[in-house]
Amino acid sequence: MPCTMSPRQIILPADATAPRVAREFLAESCCGSHEAAVIDEAQLLVSELVTNAVRHGAPPIELQVRCAGEDRLQIRVRDSERRAPEPREAEPDSEGGRGLMLVDLVSDAWGHEDDGDGKAVWFTLRV
């Protein structure tokens, strides 16, 4: 079934409510074929990226959801901090520090782009 969903985006609050708002927006934004196949993984990973943007980025924080062909869903989280994300090794008893490792493990591809006024961190999931 061809996907016809146009890209959708939202400006997220720059506070602790942002991951929840992002998950809800993602659930409302996904087309039927992508939602059924990858929504749980997408919501997990978008929570990680949005949490990083709130903790280490700068407002505004933007979330974009788009279908990238029939077989891929792409999520982009943009903020106004130009510093690139840095994956790190978390200590076994650390409460944080595993987000980008999780994105790398679960997504089919991920990366970041400097856009002059900040950065966007993105990932794709295949259906």
Image (cartoon, rainbow, N blue to C red):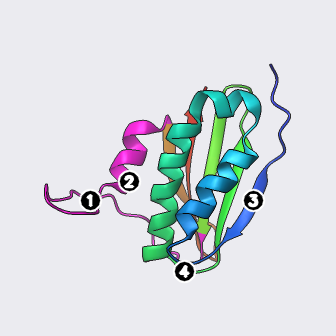
Tell me the mark number nearer the camera, choosing from 1 and 3: 3
**Residue, disc 1:** 88
| Amino acid at dot 2 | Leu
| Amino acid at dot 3 | Gln
Lower sequence index among marks 4 and 3: 3
Residue 87 counted in the magenta span: yes
What residue range appears in magenta?
Answer: 79-108
Tell me the mark number nearer the camera, choosing from 3 and 2: 3
Using a 10 Å C-alpha cutoff, classify the residue at mark 4 as few (fewer than 14 neighbours), some (14 to 19) or many (20 or more).
some
Secondary structure at badge 2 equals helix
Secondary structure at badge 4 equals loop
**Residue, disc 3:** 9
Mark number displayed over residue 100: 2
| Amino acid at dot 1 | Arg
Q: Are marks 2 and 4 in contact (CB under 8 Å)?
A: no
Q: Nearer the viewer, residue 63 or 13?
A: 13
